[in-house]
């Protein structure tokens, strides 16, 4: 049995809003004289998104607060990799900062924070999604050069140069999102106001249509290009270590776990949104009468948006696998691990002292015999 069965309706692309935490009924409101898919009446984001986003915020704040504490107070020395990971923490915090207002709007059923906060909220959501993707890619590329091309000048990057790279990444991802701050995204009035991204095409200028198109293209390219680079780095690192048989097996496994962690987080968090976005494009272009397919991909897109912010909760896994200094500092916060580390240091120190004493004793005996 089909979930929805419609006759052949036609709808204009100009009346279809951008899919960002909007309701299905709002997406499909027909325009008199234009036609359109009848409203479904199921507000899926009101049922699924609040608990998903609450989980994202709770897990993300716990993990990233611990990470921020370690970076600021426990790591004695920094390197370029640490700086890249620190910027990733900052991006996650900004992304998480945008979610409480969005959760409130979903629970209330309308937006109460005004146009200014709506613009800032949407800007933080999208710009920090892009920043997380870009910085994860930089971390993977940095590790690739460290392992596969150890003598490349890229490996001699100073902390100052790493700071410039981080600043360039932020500038690159923020620039396309700045126009969001220039337009009103409030839809409706009174107790029915909603904060959507460029809500409708019907009365939009060419500039807004261009910006929405650019946003859609970026959503896809921000996944495809970094994903290709991540897979390339992971495959080359794996192949290089296996062919050269460099280092101990544990070292090889650690490098592979780092690559696998980044790729896994990337796929889980960003692949669903990319697939559903492409699906909506195809339906709009080639099957504009297929309301069942349109509703299906609309609802899948709404659900997949929650996974984007799960990235902020999973990024601490990337920190653990990507930085030995971060890993040691984290283990130092665990009492039993800390005691084990102290015992190990004490034991190794005792063994070293004993060896020195034996060596000294042997030398003295040799001199006496002479």
Image (cartoon, rainbow, N blue to C red):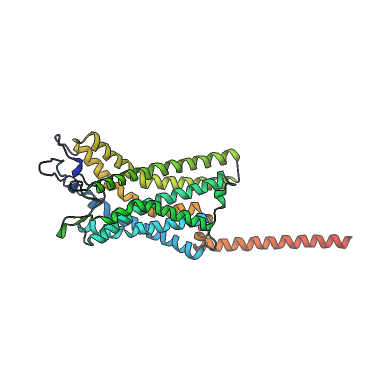
The answer to which of 43 and 123 lies nearer the viewer is 123
Residue 219 versus residue 61 in the image, above or below:
above
The answer to which of 72 and 310 lies nearer the viewer is 72
**Res. 66 image quadrant:** bottom left
Q: Is residue 63 visible?
A: no
Q: Residue 256, image x and y in percent? A: 51, 45
Left or right position of 89 against 123: right
Residue 195 versus residue 216 in the image, above or below:
below
The answer to which of 315 and 353 lies nearer the viewer is 315
Left or right position of 233 against 275: right
For the point 61% across and 62% down, the residue is 345
Q: Is residue 322 visible?
A: yes
Q: Residue 88, image x and y in percent? A: 43, 55
Residue 14 versus residue 92 in the image, above or below:
above
For the point 41% across and 62% down, the residue is 65
Q: Report the quarter where the N terminus lies.
A: top left
């Amino acid at each position: 049995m089909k979930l929805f069965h419609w006759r052949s309706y036609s709808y204009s692309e100009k009346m279809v809003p951008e899919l960002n935490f909007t309701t299905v009924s709002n997406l499909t409101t027909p325009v008199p004289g234009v036609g359109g898919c009848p409203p479904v009446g199921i507000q899926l984001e009101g049922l699924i998104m609040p608990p998903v986003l609450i989980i994202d915020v709770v897990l993300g704040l716990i993990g990233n607060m611990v990470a921020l504490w370690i970076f600021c107070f426990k790591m004695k020395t920094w390197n370029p990799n640490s700086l890249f990971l620190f910027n990733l923490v900052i991006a996650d915090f900004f992304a998480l900062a945008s979610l409480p207002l969005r959760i409130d709007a979903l629970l209330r059923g309308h937006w109460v924070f005004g146009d200014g906060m709506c613009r800032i909220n949407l800007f933080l959501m999208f710009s920090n999604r892009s920043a997380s993707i870009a910085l994860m890619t930089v971390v993977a590329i940095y590790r690739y050069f460290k392992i596969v091309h150890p003598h490349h000048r890229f490996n001699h990057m100073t902390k100052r140069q790493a700071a410039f790279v981080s600043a360039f990444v932020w500038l690159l991802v923020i620039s396309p999102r700045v126009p969001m701050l220039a337009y009103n995204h409030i839809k409706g009035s009174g107790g029915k106001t909603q904060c959507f991204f460029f809500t409708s095409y019907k009365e939009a200028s060419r500039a807004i249509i261009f910006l929405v198109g650019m946003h859609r293209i970026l959503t896809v390219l921000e996944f495809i290009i970094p994903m290709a680079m991540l897979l390339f780095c992971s495959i080359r690192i794996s192949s290089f270590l296996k062919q050269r048989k460099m280092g101990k097996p544990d070292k090889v496994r650690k490098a592979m776990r780092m690559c696998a962690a980044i790729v896994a987080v990337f796929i889980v968090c960003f692949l669903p949104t990319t697939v559903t976005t492409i699906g909506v494009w195809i339906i709009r272009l080639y099957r504009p009468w297929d309301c069942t397919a349109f509703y299906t991909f609309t609802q899948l897109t709404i659900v997949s948006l929650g996974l984007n912010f799960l990235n902020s909760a999973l990024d601490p896994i990337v920190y653990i696998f990507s930085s030995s200094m971060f890993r040691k500092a984290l283990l130092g916060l665990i009492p039993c691990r800390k005691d084990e580390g102290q015992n190990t240091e004490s034991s190794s120190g005792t063994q070293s002292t004993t060896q020195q004493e034996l060596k000294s004793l042997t030398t003295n005996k040799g001199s006496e015999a002479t």
